[in-house]
Amino acid sequence: MSVARPASSLTNSPAKGSKSESKGRGFPFHGTIAAIDKGAKTITMRGEKQRVYYITSETKINKDKIRTTLNALVVGDYVGGFAREAADGKRDLVTLNIGTASAAKPKAPAPKSGQ
C-alpha cells in the first residue's frame, strides 16, 4: 500500500541537482585590469575582447593572499581567479586574486662572486 503525499510538499522541495545547474560553467582567468566600475561592481580586462566580470556579494577578493575589498583594485593590476558563467551570460567572480604577476615570475639566482 502506498501513501499519497500532499501536492504542496512536492512543489516546495527543490529538484535534485538544481543547485549545481544554476551555478553555470566555471573557468579560471587571468590578465590585466583595463577598467573598474565600483558602482556596478564590475572589472573589465584588457585584450581584444575586453571581457567584463561581475563582483558579487560572495566573491572572495585577495591581495597577496590576504582578504581585501574592491577598493584595493587599481587599473593596471594583474589579476587572476575563478569565475562562473551565469545563465544570462554574465561572468560572476568566485575568487579574485590581485598581484599574482609578481608571485608568478621566478627570481633570477644571484650571480656568484669571488670566482
Image (cartoon, rainbow, N blue to C red):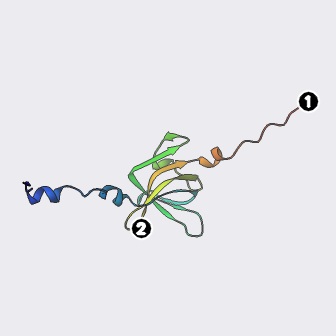
Residue nearest the viewer, comparing 28 with 61? 28
> Residue drawn at (59%, 47%), measured in percent from left and top?
100
Residue nearest the viewer, comparing 49 with 69? 49
Residue 5 coordinates in the image, percent (x, y): 9, 56
Residue 33 coordinates in the image, percent (x, y): 56, 58
Amino acid type, residue under disc 2 in the picture: Gly
* Residue that badge 2 annotates: 89
The vertical placement of 110 against 72, above or below, is above
The vertical placement of 32 against 103, above or below, is below
Residue nearest the viewer, comparing 37 with 114? 114
47 relative to 70 in the view: left or right: right
Residue extending farthest front? 1
Amino acid type, residue under disc 1 in the picture: Gly
> Residue drawn at (17%, 56%), measured in percent from left and top?
12
Q: Earlier in the sequence, mark 1 or mark 2?
A: 2
* Residue that badge 1 annotates: 114
Mark 2 crowdedness (10 Å alpha carbons): few <14, some 14-19, many ≥20: few
- Give the CA separation, mark 1 to mark 2: 61 Å
Which numbered marker is on residue 57? none
SS at mark 1? Answer: loop
SS at mark 2? Answer: loop
Mark 1 crowdedness (10 Å alpha carbons): few <14, some 14-19, many ≥20: few
